[in-house]
């Protein structure tokens, strides 16, 4: 897989996994302060979710690259007329 292809796969899969991880562990504040939305999370832990998304996207990118190099998956029929 080319560098551009790997970057595209990583970028798309990172956002997919990040949005999938967002709802996990979210709890609203017990007593929200005035001026805040009642459904705002108390501790969203976005850095942890970004780390999880990075690890999963990296694993998917490396796995897809490995499968393409071994010939387990071929994209040639999809791009040839």
Image (cartoon, grey):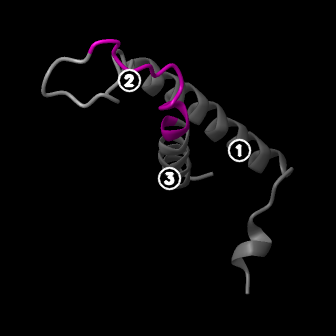
Q: Nearer the viewer, residue 33 or 1?
A: 33
Work out how far the residue at label 3 is from the one at label 2, CA to CA, in angstroms. 22 Å
Percent coordinates x, y for residue 3 in the rendering: 51, 49
Q: Earlier in the sequence, mark 3 or mark 1?
A: 3
* Callout 1: SS: helix
| Residue 67 on the magenta span | no
Q: Which residue is mark 3?
A: 8
Secondary structure state at the residue bearing disc 3 = helix
* 3D distance between C-alphas at marks 1 and 2: 26 Å
Query: Where does residue 62 sit, x and y in percent of width and height?
Result: 65, 36
CA–CA distance between discs 3 and 1? 12 Å
9 left or right of 64 in image: left
Q: In the figure, 59 relative to 12: above or below?
A: above
Which span of residues is magenta-colored?
18-31
Residue sitting at x 39%, y 18%: 45
Is the Cβ of the residue at disc 1 closer than 8 Å to that at disc 2? no
Q: Earlier in the sequence, mark 3 or mark 2?
A: 3
- Reading the image, the residue beneath label 1 is 64
């Amino acid at each position: 897989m080319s560098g551009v292809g790997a970057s595209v796969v990583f970028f798309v899969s990172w956002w997919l996994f990040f949005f999938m991880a967002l709802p996990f562990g979210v709890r609203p504040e017990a007593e929200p302060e005035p001026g805040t939305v009642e459904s705002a999370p108390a501790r969203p832990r976005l850095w942890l979710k970004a780390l999880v998304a990075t690890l999963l996207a990296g694993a998917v990118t490396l796995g897809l690259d490995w499968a393409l190099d071994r010939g387990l998956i071929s994209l040639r029929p999809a791009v040839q007329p």
